[in-house]
Amino acid sequence: MEERCEAVQMLQESIIRSIRKGTNDEDYFQHLADTMTGVIGEDVFSKDQSFPFVIGRSFLAYKLSQEGYTEYQIGRLLGKDHSTINYLKKKAKEIIDAPQYNRDAFQIWEQFNNSI
């Protein structure tokens, strides 16, 4: 079973790499993080838990999951555990699915998405 999980993970990583056309995971992640930092105007890695930082990390986690990263991989990149990543992705999806309830946050998503 463990060998199968490793094989699946290797396959996922291979697919992700081929989608990105030669960029490695760290470079791609750094590109997304820099883009989000530019959108919110502050370092997305700050420990600050105020609105723009949490929303920025939420959208970053959500985008990485769309790109095929696992919660474990996203957590490793963001320095968070998988349960935090699950929560961040859920918050991002709620905002994206119902932008009328949080227009400020949805504008951050649109700027981020249009900048990458």
Image (tube, helix red, strand yellow):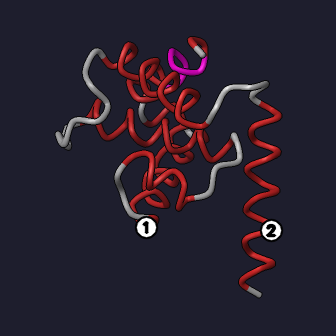
How many residues crowd mark 1 within 10 Å: few (<14), some (14–19), many (20+)? few
Q: Is residue 28 left or right of residue 12?
A: left
Q: Rounded to the nearest whole Å, what is the CA distance between mark 1 and mark 2?
A: 24 Å
Three-letter amino acid code at the position of disc 2: Ala
Q: Which mark is residue 7?
A: 2
At label 2, counting other C-alpha atoms closer than 10 Å, the crowd grade (few under 14, some 14-19, many 20 or more) is: few
Q: Is residue 70 magenta?
A: no
Q: Main secondary structure of the magenta part?
A: helix
Q: Is residue 84 left or right of residue 97?
A: left
Q: Compare residues 111 and 47 and report the one nearer the observer.
A: 47
Q: Residue at x 28, y 15 (%)?
A: 41
Q: Earlier in the sequence, mark 1 or mark 2?
A: 2
Label 2 SS: helix
Expressed as whole percent of the image width and height from the top left, the position of residue 25 reads 60, 37
The residue wearing badge 1 is 83
Q: At which x and y percent is residue 83?
A: 43, 67
Residue at 20 percent of width and 43 percent of height = 49
Q: Please name the amino acid that badge 1 sits on.
A: Ser
In the image, 7: left or right of 28? right
Residue 104, x across and y down, in percent: 38, 24
Q: Residue furthest bottom?
A: 1
Looking at the figure, which quarter contains the N terminus? bottom right
Query: In the rendered view, would you say 112 is above or below 52?
Result: above
Check if residue 112 falls in the magenta segment. Answer: yes
What quarter of the picture does the C terminus occupy?
top right
Magenta span: 109-113
Viewer-side label of 1, 2: 2
Q: Position of residue 95 (x, y in %)?
A: 50, 40
| Residue in the image at 28% along x and 34% along y | 53
